[in-house]
């Protein structure tokens, strides 16, 4: 019953947002400023029949997944080190704080000097996402039940068995939360990086091209593809976390 009420509330919120958008569009009366939602929807649906859009979507998908994989790998390593050693956590704290404070735009512009245009969005998203993963993994490492660790010590279990038999299961919820945050952040930063770096095939490049043509409906239609990627990945990880919660993890 609760889940049904939440779905109804979400639908009501979406309907209210669309109604507000439609009303604002009618009041403004200029498509170049704010086109109506139905026009954007038609443009977005038509995009999936265009090979250029499909290639751009596939390229952005690949960059986002690459950034996500890198951030999860690096974040897991750094986070485990921070959780296991307070000294290591203090050592890397200035670096992680600097990355969190660095504006994304400044990072992307800097990477344009160092990397190929196709790699800029990947490395920018990786640097933005991996501190989030590291923080979650460190918290999960520290939250492991000390009684389980004491029992492992008494039975002299090997480090590998302690890691994969106790530590990793204890961190499952934190890893899922880290993955959900990292994938959402990866899509946003990747697309922002593509807008500035302009790879041949990218959603961000399509957004910039439509902006230069003063095609507001086109900009919103291409942006909707990025929203769709975020929504799908968020739904997957949310379902995964709910499943973990049902099993008490």
Image (cartoon, helix red, strand yellow):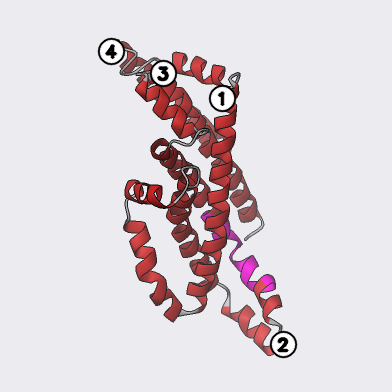
- Indicate which disc, 4 or 1, sits on the residue closer to the N terminus: 4
Instruction: Classify mark 1: helix, strand or loop.
Output: helix
Mark 1 nearby-residue class (10 Å; few <14, some 14–19, many ≥20): some
Q: Specify whether residue 16 is in view.
A: no
Expressed as whole percent of the image width and height from the top left, the position of residue 109 reads 35, 47
Q: Which of marks 4 and 1 is in front?
A: 1
Expressed as whole percent of the image width and height from the top left, the position of residue 125 reads 46, 49
Give the labeled residue for mark 3: 217
Give the labeled residue for mark 4: 27
- Measured Cα–Cα span from mark 1 to mark 3: 17 Å
Give the labeled residue for mark 1: 52
Mark 3 nearby-residue class (10 Å; few <14, some 14–19, many ≥20): many
Position of 77 relative to 70 (above/below):
below
Q: What stretch is highlighted in magenta?
A: 164-178
Pointer 1 and pointer 3: residues touching (CB < 8 Å)? no
Give the labeled residue for mark 2: 155
């Amino acid at each position: 019953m609760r889940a049904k009420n939440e779905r109804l509330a979400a639908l009501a919120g979406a309907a209210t947002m669309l109604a507000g958008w439609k009303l604002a569009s009618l009041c403004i009366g200029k498509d170049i400023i704010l086109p109506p939602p139905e026009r954007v929807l038609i443009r977005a649906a038509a995009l999936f029949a265009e090979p250029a859009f499909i290639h751009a979507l596939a390229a952005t998908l690949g960059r986002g997944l690459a950034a996500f994989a890198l951030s999860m790998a690096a974040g897991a390593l750094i986070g485990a080190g921070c959780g296991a050693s307070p000294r290591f956590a203090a050592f890397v704290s200035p670096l992680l704080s600097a990355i969190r404070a660095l504006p994304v735009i400044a990072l992307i512009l800097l990477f344009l000097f160092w990397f190929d245009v196709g790699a800029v969005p990947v490395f920018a998203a990786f640097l933005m996402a991996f501190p989030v993963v590291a923080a979650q993994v460190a918290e999960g490492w520290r939250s492991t039940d000390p009684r389980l660790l004491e029992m492992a010590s008494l039975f002299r279990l090997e480090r590998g068995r302690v890691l994969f038999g106790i530590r990793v299961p204890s961190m499952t919820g934190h890893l899922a939360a880290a993955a959900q945050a990292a994938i959402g952040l990866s899509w946003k930063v990747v697309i922002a990086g593509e807008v500035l770096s302009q790879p041949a095939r990218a959603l961000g490049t399509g957004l910039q091209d439509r902006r230069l043509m003063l095609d507001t409906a086109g900009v919103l239609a291409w942006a909707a593809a990025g929203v769709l990627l975020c929504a799908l990945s968020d739904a997957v990880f949310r379902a995964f976390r709910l499943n973990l919660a049902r099993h008490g993890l």
